[in-house]
Amino acid sequence: MKIHEYQAKEIFTRYGIPVPKNKMVESAEAIDGALREIGGDTFVVKAQIHAGGRGKAGGVRVAQGASEAARIAREMLGAKLVTRQSGPQGRVVRKISLDAAVAIDREYYLAVTLDRAKARGVILSSQAGGMDIEEVAHTQPEKINKTYFDLVFGLASYQAREVALGLGKDPAFVKAVTQIVQKLTEIFVRLDASLVEINPLVLTRDGAVTAIDAKIDFEDNGLYRHPEVGALRDPLEEDPREVEAKKYNLNYVGLDGSVGCMVNGAGLAMATMDVIMLAGGMPANFLDVGGGAKVDQVKAAFKIILSDERVKSILVNIFGGIMKCDVVADGIIQAARDVQLRVPLVVRLEGTNVEKGKELLRQSGIRITPAEGLSQAASLAVQLAGKS
Ligand code: ADP
């Protein structure tokens, strides 16, 4: 789960990582009051969207004086912002953060994430911080330092110092950065984050070290332990198909292909996507309706798949174990009656109550292409997607 920069900064403040004074606003009326509260005479107006690359896209703008800041803030609120991470359709800016500007001497990069292959935490740090860290990682990977740590024993203090010494030698700087590295790691471990990032971490002209950007991504599977983190979710920033799927407890991930998939079981869903690709097609989604799906869930799953305009055919692949084939068949029939089934539907049923399920489908009068076996089902779905 992603959260906004202003929310990540609130967490930083709670853990003692310094950030510039800032205030989130979501209405034009709140702007003047927020600027007065921040004070000073130089401000940074920052669009709050769940996508990076805002700086280069005009989503981070420096303003001299409160009236210029207010003008920029009003312009930004409600406008659409297209960044290299937002997708070509861009995002509507519903929230902005008004920050006190700091006089920057140097910019650094600092992040904590998980190295899944090594099953360890890793701190990424670089003197080449700022807006182009992805480019640095690509072209000059040697400029990014990696420090691994054990997730159970945590980060040793000498390691935190080592990270800081990799960025600078001034004693006050090293002390400040060491503390920030320790706190960043503490946030990462305690809150079950998958990424905690500061880009850039800055050394100001008066020698202070502060995080002018903040990003935290959380591991969805850990959210049940942190209801206060779950409460930070902003559904308006998420894929509407995935938001809808969550309501029905469906495991759905939106992809870009043309073959919609409805499968029970995550392993079978992965295998189905593989076989679709083997047959020369591209899946439009990952969807695991779960072992004990009810008619309502199957119906909802269908509607979500069909709401995606890229979907040109649907492949239903059900292996009835706990899930019974007749329940799926019933869901398919109800959904097909409820929504306009605008694309061909290939169904492969196997397992518990399979004959009952097939019979229900036959009697329903809905146009279905039945398939025997997964490879035939996938080839048919891919062929039909190509034709429609
Ligand atoms: P993004 O990563 O989405 O482009 P950032 O938060 O990193 O957005 O902001 C982009 C740039 O704007 C920073 O690299 C920094 O140079 C400048 N900036 C952002 N916040 C401030 C601030 N409070 N004071 C001064 N400069 C800032």
Image (spheres, rainbow, N blue to C red):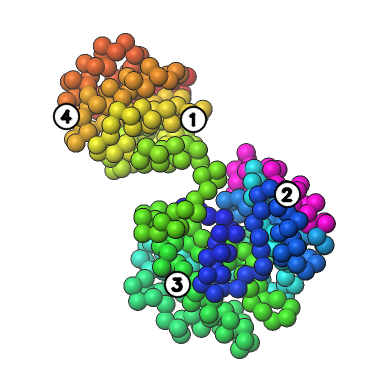
Q: Is residue 321 left or right of residue 115?
A: left
The stretch drawn in magenta includes residue 191: no
- Residue that carries the numbered disc 1 in the rendered image: 308
Write down which quadrant ligand 1 falls in: bottom right
Q: Are marks 3 and 2 in contact (CB under 8 Å)?
A: no
Q: Is residue 329 left or right of residue 321?
A: right
- What secondary structure is found at the residue carrying circle 4? loop
Q: Name the kind of residue labelled 1 in the image.
A: Asp
- Percent across and percent down for residue 52 are 61, 54
Closer to the camera: disc 4 or disc 2?
Answer: 2
Q: Along the line of sight, which residue is nearer the eye, 186 or 68? A: 68
| Res. 268 in view | no
Q: Along the line of sight, which residue is nearer the eye, 189 or 83? A: 189
Q: Residues within 10 Å of mark 4 (few under 14, many from 20)?
A: some
Confirm or reject: label 1 Cβ below 8 Å from ligand 1. Answer: no
Q: First in sequence: mark 4 or mark 2?
A: 2
Q: Name the kind of residue labelled 2 in the image.
A: Glu
Question: Total of numbered circles in the picture?
Answer: 4
Q: First in sequence: mark 1 or mark 3?
A: 3
In the image, the segment drawn in magenta is 67-91
- What secondary structure is found at the residue carrying circle 2? helix
- Residue that carries the numbered disc 4 in the rendered image: 352
Residue 29 is tagged as 2
- Residue that carries the numbered disc 3 in the rendered image: 186
Residue at position x 43%, y 20% from top?
Answer: 339
